[in-house]
Image (cartoon, rainbow, N blue to C red):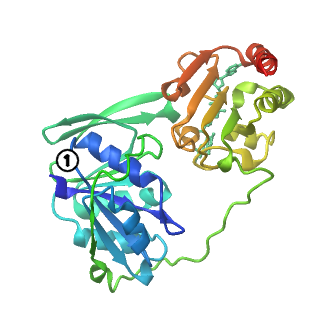
Amino acid sequence: MDAKIFVFVTHTDGKADDSALELVTAARSLFPGCTPSALVAGSGVGPVCQEVAASFGEVWKFDQAALAYPNAELLRPLLVKVLPAGATLLLAHNTFGLDLGPGLSVKLGVTYVPDVVGVDGLEGTTLRAVRQEYAGQVSSHVHCDIAKGAVITVRPGAFKPADAGAAAGQVVDRSEDATGLAARRTFVELIQAEAGDIDITREDVLVSVGRGIGDKENIPLVEELVEAMGAALSCSRPIVDAKWLDKSRQVGTSGKTVKPRVYLALGISGSFQHVGGIKGNPFLLAINKNPKAAIFQVATIGVVADLMELLPVLTEKILKSK
Ligand SMILES: Cc1cc2nc3c(=O)[nH]c(=O)nc-3n(C[C@H](O)[C@H](O)[C@H](O)COP(=O)(O)OP(=O)(O)OC[C@H]3O[C@@H](n4cnc5c(N)ncnc54)[C@H](O)[C@@H]3O)c2cc1C
């Protein structure tokens, strides 16, 4: 079974994305004891292959100028050609994974399991996976037959990254298989988002505020806590939509991906679009007045309280303790 489990490794600026090692953990949760193989496509991807080799049984390298930018239209026929019958392929559930995954599963004639956040196990050929519905309010447990193989997209951040170095993968150059690929879609330009006044992706301690703060006039209460902690201020999307804070402060799938050591989620419900932007398994303290808020499922410590009452007390305690 080992040889048939693949992880599609995406990369940026010559380095594998964080999702690579998260997908290794997801693969091992699905198939305990397995050592998946990696697929790395791009132009000049030798260093990426070497980087991830220590975590995979084999690394298949597809090095072609045409693959310089991720293009699902090129990769779909390539993967149909190279994946063995019965293969299970894991991809990150991001815009690229969503572009590639569904059509690929159709072409391969295998099951498509999107946006997996957990695994209940495998019973025979039946995969029992956990997904979330209604912006994370409900967990659904789905059963799918993967006897013929599967394409599974895994939510970024849902699995802890595997420790690198557990395998000694061989890099197998399969670039010849990727010749003659043609697509109607072409890469035009990469537009980087503006950095803003502070770069929350580099901050160690983030205090993040959500709609639970109620009003723009209450933001200074949070800023006082931020200052007392020597932290940086970030937020959920509704705060940006309401123009209470700048877009550069937004954490989440359509905002920034952050990797702090400590993350305070204040009045944030814990939608997957928000939590998907929190990486690196920080110490996560959530304060929310709803004991059933989804954020408590991922929090290290959860406090059920009204922000308006707790915030001033918390700030004062921190200032006194200094
Ligand atoms: C395509 C797409 C992309 C998106 N991208 C992002 C993204 O990048 N980042 C992002 O954050 N969201 C994103 N969203 C929105 C996301 O789905 C949620 O709507 C959003 O994260 C909710 O923000 P919130 O938790 O602040 O607000 P809510 O979901 O409204 O939650 C507010 C929370 O505050 C609590 N609360 C209320 N009053 C108090 C109080 N006095 N004290 C304590 N707790 C209180 C409530 O119990 C509730 O849990 C995206 C959505 C879509 C469709």
Is residue 131 rendered to the left or right of residue 169?
Answer: right
Residue most extreme to the bottom: 180
Q: Position of residue 272 (x, y in %)?
A: 52, 38
Q: Nearer the viewer, residue 214 or 10?
A: 10
Q: Nearer the viewer, residue 124 or 221?
A: 221
The residue lying at 22 percent from left, 66 percent from top is 83
Q: Position of residue 260 (x, y in %)?
A: 61, 41
Q: Nearer the viewer, residue 321 or 42?
A: 321
Q: Is residue 320 above or below residue 182?
A: above
Residue most extreme to the front: 322
Q: Is residue 102 above or below residue 41?
A: above
Where residue 67 sits, quadrant-wise, is bottom left
Residue pointed to by mark 1: 146
Q: Secondary structure at mark 1?
A: loop
Amino acid type at image mark 1 = Ile
Q: Crowdedness of circle 1 by 10 Å Cα count: few (<14), some, many (20+)?
A: many
Q: Position of residue 185 (x, y in %)?
A: 48, 76
Is residue 231 rendered to the left or right of residue 26?
Answer: right
